[in-house]
Structure formats: structure tokens, C-alpha cells
Image (cartoon, grey):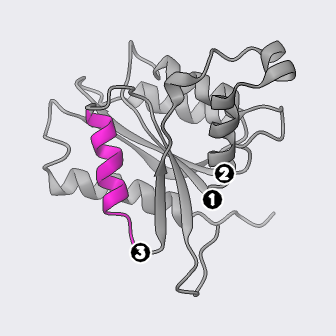
Amino acid sequence: MTTSNSPLARTRVAVLVGSLRPDSLNRKVAELVRDRAPEGVELDIVDGLDDLPFYEEGLDATATPAAATALRERVRAADAILVVTPEYNGTMPAVLNNAIDWLSRPYGAGAIVGKPLGVTGTTPTPYGGKWAHEDTVRSAGIAGAIAVDGAVHSQSVLEVDPLGDDEVVAEFLRVLDAVVSYQPVAA
């Protein structure tokens, strides 16, 4: 992490939003967390996931698309990753899975490797996106990210207004705090 006692030090967090709609509730959650991030924490909501072609190794080897290069650079420049996503058909949205595929390459040295990762979001199901969040943690972990213990929160919009409930907002911010506070365990 980039944090230190220096007032100029910042922790940079790349935020991947699993919904492409500009007006999506999960986009609003990402913006809320960005706007309420603690001092010294800067969130970069990474746009352009819809510009990524589906991952294909031959394309990546011969002419990596500009959108994939831009995604990799922004995530590589970050200290951590926060995913804010809904759940589509019991799993993560395809656009998020595709972004993880692009970030996982080159194998073992992708931009996601070694980055602390947290997942949160909301969806209008009784489980609040739990399966999507579990699948995101598993996929990103296989790609080399470090899923931070306790840095997953799923919220159902059937229970509360996630943007207007102080306890829910505190949970979103707790996930961010867990990610930026992550310290690797000494071997």
C-alpha cells in the first residue's frame, strides 16, 4: 500500500462496477463510497469495461486492444481493488468476468496479481448479490488478487434503500476500510 504517515501519501483503489448502466444503483454505491472515502484514500472508478472485447488469447498476443491496455494500466497503478456489482442470473455480470480475464494476463503477472480485493454491491434479490460476490472473489483470487477476509458485503434492496440507510452505507465503507487496511501476513 501507499499509505504512510506522510500527509501526501495516498492509497489508490481501482473500482470495477459490474453494471454498465450509467444510472445503476451499484454505480451510485461506487460513487457514494468514493465520495465518503477517508482522507488519504482515492477511488478511481474505472470506466470503459463495455469497450473490452471478450478475452481471446490470440488477440491479446498480437494486438492488445487499447481498452484492455487502459484497464490494465489503471489497475496496475492502484494499491487495491474494490468491486461493486449486482448479480445477474445467480453470478457476476459477464462484463466483470471479462475484465477479470483481461486483468489476469499475462498469466502470473497480470495487473490484478497481488492486489487486495474487496467486493460489495446490491441487487433486488433476497440474497443481495451473495453468489455474484462469491464468484467474483473466486475468479479474482484464481487470477492472483488477494481476497481480503471480511471485505465482502452483499445487500438486498428488498430490505432497505442501500443509499439511504446509514447502517448499510457503513457496511459499504467498512469493506473499503478492510481493503485499504489489508496487511499481508508474514510467512
Q: Tag on residue 29?
A: none
- Residue 87 x/y as whole percent: 38, 23
Label 2 and label 1: CA atoms lie apart by 6 Å
32 with respect to 75 (left or right): left
Residue 132 higher or lower than 149, as above or below: above
Q: Amino acid at mark 3?
A: Glu
Give yes or no for residue 34 being in the magenta stretch.
yes
Residue 7 higher or lower than 94, as above or below: below
Residue 86 higher or lower than 27, as above or below: above
- Characterize the magenta stretch by its predominant secondary structure: helix
Q: Amino acid at mark 2?
A: Lys
Assess disc 2: are there few (<14), some (14-19) or many (≥20) residues with their C-alpha within 10 Å of its C-alpha.
many
Question: Residue, x 64% and y 71% (percent of image)?
Answer: 2
Q: Tag on residue 39?
A: 3
| Residue at disc 3, secondary structure | loop
- Residue 124 x/y as whole percent: 22, 25
3 with respect to 178 (left or right): right
Q: Nearer the viewer, mark 2 or mark 1?
A: 1
Q: Amino acid at mark 1?
A: Asp
- Residue 128 x/y as whole percent: 29, 31
Q: Magenta stretch: give its range.
A: 25-38
